[in-house]
Amino acid sequence: MPLDSRIWGKGAGLGKDAHGVEYAHPLVCHLLDTAAVAEAVWDELLTEHQRGIVVAALRVTDGQARALAAFWAGLHDIGKIRVPFQLHKNGPNRGDSGKTPRAHELRAEPGYAFGAEAERDGQSHEAAAHWWLAGIFEEIGYPSSRRRPQSQLSHAVAQLLGGHGGRMHPVVHEKDSRCPLARHPGLGAGNWEEQRRVHFDEVRRVVGATSVPQGRMTPEAAVVLTGVVTLSDWLASAEEGIRARLREAGWAGTPEDLDAYWQVARAAAPGLLRQTDLLGTGFARPPAPVPGAESGLLASMARQLPDLVAEQGPGMVVVTAAPSEERTEAILRAAAVLGHAANARGLFYALPTGSAADTHMAQVNEFAERALTGPWRSLLLHSSSRLKPAEAAAGWARAQMGDEISAEPGEEWVASANSWLNSHHRALLAALGTGTVDELLQAVLPVKFNVMRLFALSSKVIVVDEAHARGAWGHQLMLRFLEWAAVLRIPVVLAATAADRSVDAMLAAYRRGAGRGGEPVEQPRWLPAWSFADAGSGKAHLPRQPAGSGRDSTLSITVVDGTPYAEIRAALEPMVAAGEGRAAVYRPTPTEAVRTFRRVREDLPGADVVLIHEQMRNKDRWQRLAACRRGFAAEGGARGPSVLVTTPMLEHVRGLHVDLVVSGPAPLANLLARASQSAGDRSRLVVLRADAASDLDDPALVRRTDMLLGAGRVIAVPGDLTESLDEVYADESVDRLGWNAARELRQLDNRRVVRERRASGSARWLAVPGPRELDGDLGLLSRDHSGLDLGLLSSVLGEELAHVVCLYPGKDSAGASPRFLEYGVPEEMLDLGTGKKKRPKPGQLVPHLIPVPKRVAETVEGDANEVWRSVAALKNVLRLNMKEEDGEWVHFSSEYRFCMTEDGLMIDQLP
């Protein structure tokens, strides 16, 4: 039976001919397009190690593996040869008044006959590919098993191809794969089945994938091949490229036609890949260390790590040291050594918070200038930027214009707004990324395209700064991620303030993923320290440790009992009177930060007071962070007394240097993170006992910290850090209390333990299996839990945030009343497009987004309309239609008053 070129694969956005008939791209052409792109991806994008993973798993040569990858990619949409898809009302139509599908004529031909149940079959085309291909692969000799189909290659390849839409499907057992039509009549019999077979055979013939692999699908090979297939489909589906390859009317799809089209597809594929900004990035050879130029941690790692990596291969470096510029430089240098040894194609720098990512991006970009070769694109990835990462990075760059180490829009690293990378699911593929750790953790949660995240990370070096800072749920997910990182041989650098059992567990997880069980290994408990585990064997290496900095600095902590603002003013007045010095004041909420900022500015007019908090527009926050990096730099910076008023969002930010830190109550680890911004040999921290703690802080740890500190304490840094942190958790703390106080603390401790166990249990339940637990069933990577909902997933990811955008009334030149993103600024009129559905362009909103707690945003009614919701990128964006009231721009929900000021968004609960 000849191939039927009327079977279409792509239709949307391809235009119409002179008679109004919508163009359609034959399915076989799309399959060959995708196969050709897969060849280019194999040749130009995959690292040598990624190709080696596939070759070893399939037990074939590199050339055979390349052909098989292209063949399989070319089969990804074969499930579109089914009744509901070909006759779908939204498919390409004839251009008549009834909008009849072009494929409607198939209905009238006897060979394409089908029953009513076929049209009602709700199986997706991705799942249909999985069901049908499992049987056909067995027919052509791929290894198979009746009892455990998931354990053999025939089913694994089918399951992988069925997951190209972002989710793997459950195992198809032998009785179903032998006759899938019985369960899913939408597949169609007769010509429908014949056309699936003809398309299968022709793609195989044209691509030249005649070999029959006898290997098995390892977890790491499944990640690489899923990435190749999905990425190739994305690139081959670009409408502009398809329009350039459309066949003329009457194209028959004969073998000669297909051979000729294959050459067209192959010629176009490298250009499609080059447009992604993914090619050509690598790591330069790190410079040899200069003897005697450095000491301590930097010197120890510079002398030993390159030789360790040269002998053992890439792996994971664990650095435990107090937060500092030196530690950041040490972990970046370690990343450079690992990246060069692994021939990695980029780096992702993960941090606990979006604000930390905002401030680290400059240093990461500076590192890339030294360490990376070839072109590279840098993106900012966290909850406030992932809507449109390219616009976010460009907005961040505009805020850095006064900073000599930054890049301005238009320079090489800035991705353009129309960049292929400017999409949430694609952004992690960029050569350089700075973002939050949840971008990594989503790779081991059953979310859409989680395997693509693993693929994107498998060619990079991963840096996790403050690896212990995301609580019990984050710790459990990090353990699972590190298992996958090791099996994929991803080089990792972990940094933590001090070594404890959680750091030991992360080291063990990486070793477990590398196949190493047996004896536990502890990270050295002194500070600073570092260790290395190679990904090849999982063996841990404890090199000669740094001698330290020669002497400890001291952190002087004073606990005061007066009213919070009175104590803040008292702490700042001597500095202002002296006419010099810099201080950081931490307040528990944005609203408190704004009020403190205004009072300090009024009461201490001699000080330069700066405000930063999370409820500012992205662009305002980026500008103020950039100004703080300059004004609070270690050298130079602002002259005269300067005060930074902020919230806990800034505690993981580096590059700020102050003489004094003032903070409300918090767990000791958080206080130490804030105090690390206090410069000099004698740092000062004032703790306001009467202030409110942040809602995010654990009450038991806040109470234990308060007991430990008493009226004050002096801590040697780094010498006393580990002991002091351990002392917070010590049981002896309870024994020294009276009966009532001890009972209250035990209750708080019990609640903390319950919360941590609940979080750990939820994370273990939600996480995908480890690579050695997968047992061949790729469907477990996308498994649906009966209790899984978006709310629980957001909670586990720590993303209980929504984003609002404030809109202001105004008039345009035509007299209409559009909304504006800034009041009285014509250039900031909200662009709702020209279509019937008035939907904003997500990229325009990025600079104006403001994160707010989701519980607060949920009280806003009526303004997040359904039209906005229909845009996937805007599902978590709420609009606040502001109105002027007593000189202020306000919006009221059922429970809260929102007031937008030059100091950010203030949210007050209504009485």
Image (spheres, rainbow, N blue to C red):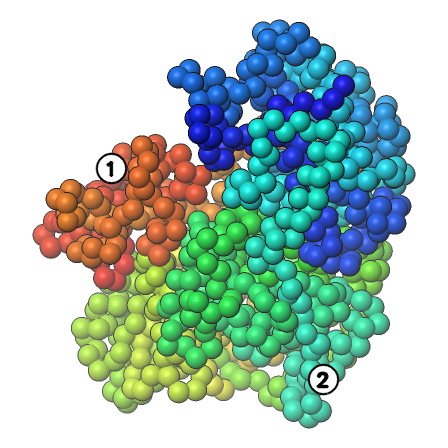
Callout 2: SS = loop
Query: For mark 2, does the 10 Å Cα neighbourhood hold few (<14), some (14 to 19), or many (20 or more) residues?
Result: few
Look at mark 1 in the image and give the residue it sits on.
894
Q: Quadrant of the C terminus?
A: top left
Tell me which numbered mark, 2 or 1, is placed earlier along the sequence: 2
Look at mark 2 in the image and give the residue it sits on.
288
Q: Is residue 295 above or below residue 805?
A: below
Give the percent coordinates (x, y) of residue 81.
65, 23
Q: Nearer the viewer, mark 2 or mark 1?
A: 2
Q: Quadrant of the N terminus?
A: top right
Q: Amino acid at mark 1?
A: Ser
Q: Report if residue 689 is visible in the image.
A: no
* Cα separation between marks 2 and 1: 63 Å
Q: Are marks 2 and 1 in contact (CB under 8 Å)?
A: no
Indicate left or right for 190 with 244 as reference: right
Q: Amino acid at mark 2?
A: Ala
Q: Residue sitting at 82 percent across and 63 percent down?
A: 539
The residue positioned farthest toward the bottom in the image shown: 292
Q: Is residue 370 above or below residue 170?
A: below
Place residue 661 in its image quadrant: bottom left
Q: Residue sitting at 24 percent across and 37 percent down?
A: 894
Q: Residue sitting at 60 percent across and 77 percent down?
A: 370
Q: Residue sitting at 55 percent across and 15 percent down?
A: 104
Q: Nearer the viewer, residue 718 or 298?
A: 298
Callout 1: SS = loop
Q: Report if residue 825 is visible in the image.
A: yes
Place residue 839 in its image quadrant: top left
Give the percent coordinates (x, y) of residue 473.
58, 48
